[in-house]
Amino acid sequence: MTTSKDNTQKKIMNRWVVVIGAIMIQVALGAIYAWSAFTTPLQGTETVLSEFAFNKTQTQAIFSAGLATFAIFTIIGGRLSKRFGPRNIALLGGVVLGIGYVLGGFVGANFIAKLFCIGIMGGAGIGLAYVVPIAVGVKWFPDKKGLVSGLAVAGFGFGAFIWILMANPPSILGFNGLITEQSSMYTIANVDATFRLYGILFLALVGLGSLVMINPPQGWKPKGWNPPEEKDAKGNTKKTISLNPKEMLHKKQFYLLWMMFFIGALAGLMVIGNIQNFAKSPTDGFAANPDFATQAVDIAVIGAAVCLPIFNGIGRIVWGKISDNIGRRKAIIAMCVFQGIMMLAFFYTTVNPLFFYVAAALIGFNFGANFALFPAATADSFGSENVGLNYGYVFTSYGIGGIVGPILAGAVQDAGLSFLYAFIPAAAMCFIAAGLAIIYKPHD
């Protein structure tokens, strides 16, 4: 005999559709990690000039403004999503992101206007939409929080790969990207046309993905799955955790997660924002190596456009699954130690392109872990009910890390110093983060 409960269960959509929609949204939001494709066209080089003529600090300022605004608006997006529904807020984010890039394609070489449209508006749109797939996904997959957090944001890393290749592919691929130099000059017309096209594509992808951003019914759980019972020191069953942001801010776990995420973001974003500048550096990069000087540009693009973003996406899925198996704390410790080692090693990889590609891939792989581990850890520590709101506060650490890391590396370059002055402090902080992870426990 079929019960009304059975009929209700049949009407509920397949939860994996949510994952597909999440990936579509995140592919568009990954635009911010494609920024390295625009740094050279906006700056120019010694041999190829740019009609924009921005300096390195200015290009990193646009990137950092986007990261900071992104982080702030994750809180706003979480609050609005709870009030107006996740589908509406995801769509709003897509509209703001798309319009920001389209407008940014009409302002030419005006640095302040570029900073506002691409950095601030683009970052705001990303922040509004970003938290939605994570929060909705965790509610549909309480049995696979780490894995689905990784899947929900995997598109972010893969999106960077797509957008970089479309804009500025390495010449060995045999085709021109949307941004091409003309007569040894990067023109405003080509670069701005790319910004406008990207804005339209971002709006379309987020709009389609937002259609399935719907929370499961109250009290729903996967068939055959029951929440594991947690015991306190006296052997009594603990109550289900469901903290709001105000309550969360009184817990030491919040501050530990915040600081660990800040460090992980600082190290990864320093490389993402500056990988092409590092590879092409005339003192530290391949341009200083007579064996590879003529290939420096292609090597830089392959590292930035292929190795790092692909493994960034893979890392989100793999580390999420690892954390489901060994626990969030152990996974965070392993990731931080691994990333610290890679930040130290990265400086010495410009002796051989293969070493550079492997290191870029591993840095991207570890960086991707942050976006699977910390949303899941937030749900573990403070509950899944308000994870969209709570994770927004944790995510502000990413925005601060996104200011400190890229701008530190940009300032080091403009001062004529070695990249070591940026990589060594980042590595040291990664080891500090591993120490913080050792004392982190999901609950008091």
Image: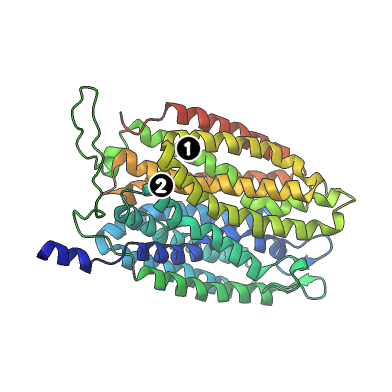
335, above or below 295, in the image: above
Give the residue number, with chain letter if any, for mark 2: 146
> Which residue corresponds to the image point at 40% horizontal and 73% vertical from the top-left?
208
Can the viewer see residue 419?
no
Q: Position of residue 161 (x, y in %)?
A: 60, 62
Q: Observer-nearest residue: 317 or 2?
A: 2
Give the residue number, with chain letter if any, for mark 1: 331
Are the residues at dot 1 and dot 2 in contact (C-beta closer than 8 Å)?
yes
Total numbered badges shown on the rendered structure: 2
Q: Position of residue 377 (x, y in %)?
A: 38, 41
Q: Observer-nearest residue: 70 or 113?
A: 70
- Tell me where residue 210 sits by quadrant: bottom left
Q: Observer-nearest residue: 238 or 401?
A: 238
Quadrant occupied by the C terminus? top left
Relative side of 394 to 80, left or right? right
- Tell me where residue 78 sits by quadrant: bottom left
> Which residue corresponds to the image point at 60% horizontal and 56% vertical from the top-left?
309
* Callout 2: SS: helix
Q: Amino acid at mark 1?
A: Ala
* Callout 1: SS: helix
Relative side of 49 to 424, left or right? right
> Which residue corresponds to the image point at 73% horizontal and 65% vertical from the top-left?
170
